[in-house]
Amino acid sequence: MNAPLVKVEVRGRVGLLTLDRPKTLNALSNEVINELAEAMRAFDADENIGAIVLTGSEKAFAAGADISAMQGWSYMDVYKQDYLGGNWESLKRIRKPVIAAVAGYALGGGCELAMQCDFIIAADNAKFGQPEIKLGVIPGYGGTQRLPRAISKAKAMDLILTARMMDAEEAERAGLVSRVVPLERLMDEVIEAATIIASMSLPSVIMAKECVNMAYEGSLNDTLMFERRNFHALFATEDQKEGMKAFVEKRKPEFKHQ
Ligand code: CAA
């Protein structure tokens, strides 16, 4: 049996997934994505997990889709397998929050995978880019759509058309990452954030994620209604009763995640 390409660990209520294909800087082959999707689905279904962290190595979160695998493919090869659909696309259906902990290179499909997560916390050595144009292709896993929404059309055009890399400081200024921390603090900081999220009421966490994603993906009228209806729905949960009662009684809530 081949060694796993994605390491799976549990830290309290946090599920930790580590891309582990160091010889290729975590190049994202279909095999890596299949393992990743399977592990994410397992955490999503596990009621003892409240948040998921996805990371790579200190040198590379992921240096993109696997160029060696792609180089010989024809149009029919990519079309027939619906390359970048299937398990790649299924990652966006994970309901629990997923935080990307990015150190080193997040390029091409690696940058797109990080953007597919709910937010990115970057180490100070992180480098982001969409260099596909140098290979005679374009970003194919959402980069042309998610990057302009995340960092503006001007910056997205600059990165996608010139293939230049953006360091962590520029990525934070541009709004691609939520925070930048020293490399040696990255995993502590991300696990801490995920632990905080996992301590919240799971139904409200999932609804908050869905509503923020709607803001990003839909029209304002529809998304405001989507938010309001979800807000209403949370009044059917025990955690809403407990959360508000605890506030009034000046104590910490004890959520049952239902
Ligand atoms: N696919 C396959 N192998 C890769 C890879 C990738 N995306 N990125 C790096 N590797 C391999 C290298 O071929 C090299 O293998 P060997 O040791 O067998 O030669 C190994 O990883 C180490 O890489 P380098 O020697 O190049 O390391 P470096 O430190 O000199 O450079 C780098 C690092 C700047 C990230 C450079 O490796 C690089 O430019 N990688 C490619 C980045 C890229 O173009 N990504 C986009 C891919 S296409 C895509 O993602 C499509 C999409 O939208 C989904």
Image (spheres, grey):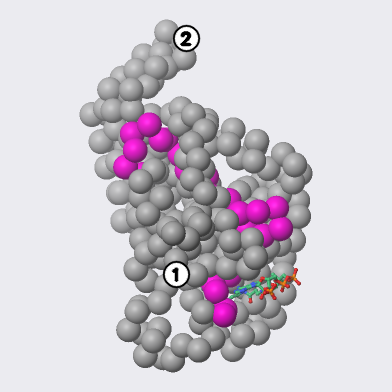
Looking at the picture, tell me which residue is in the foreground, 85 or 175.
85
Residues rendered magenta in the picture: 44-68
Residue that numbered label 1 is attached to: 30
| Residue under the image location 41 percent in, 50 percent down | 39
For mark 2, what is the residue? 250
Q: Residues within 10 Å of mark 2 (few under 14, many from 20)?
A: few
Q: Is residue 107 above or below residue 172?
A: below
Q: Residue 96: where, in percent of width, then height?
A: 40, 43
57 within the magenta span: yes
Q: Residue 209 appears in which quarter of the rendering?
A: top left
Residue shown at 35% from the left, 46% from the top: 42
> Disc 1 to disc 2, how far (Cα)?
50 Å
Residue 218 visible (yes or no):
no
Quadrant of residue 153 in the image? bottom right
Q: Secondary structure at mark 2?
A: loop
Q: At x 42% / y 8%, what residue is drawn? A: 249
Q: Please name whichever residue, 89 or 255, is drawn nearer the observer in this view of the structure.
A: 89
- Identify whether 85 is placed above or below 21: below
Of the numbered discs 1 and 2, the one sitting upstream in the chain is 1
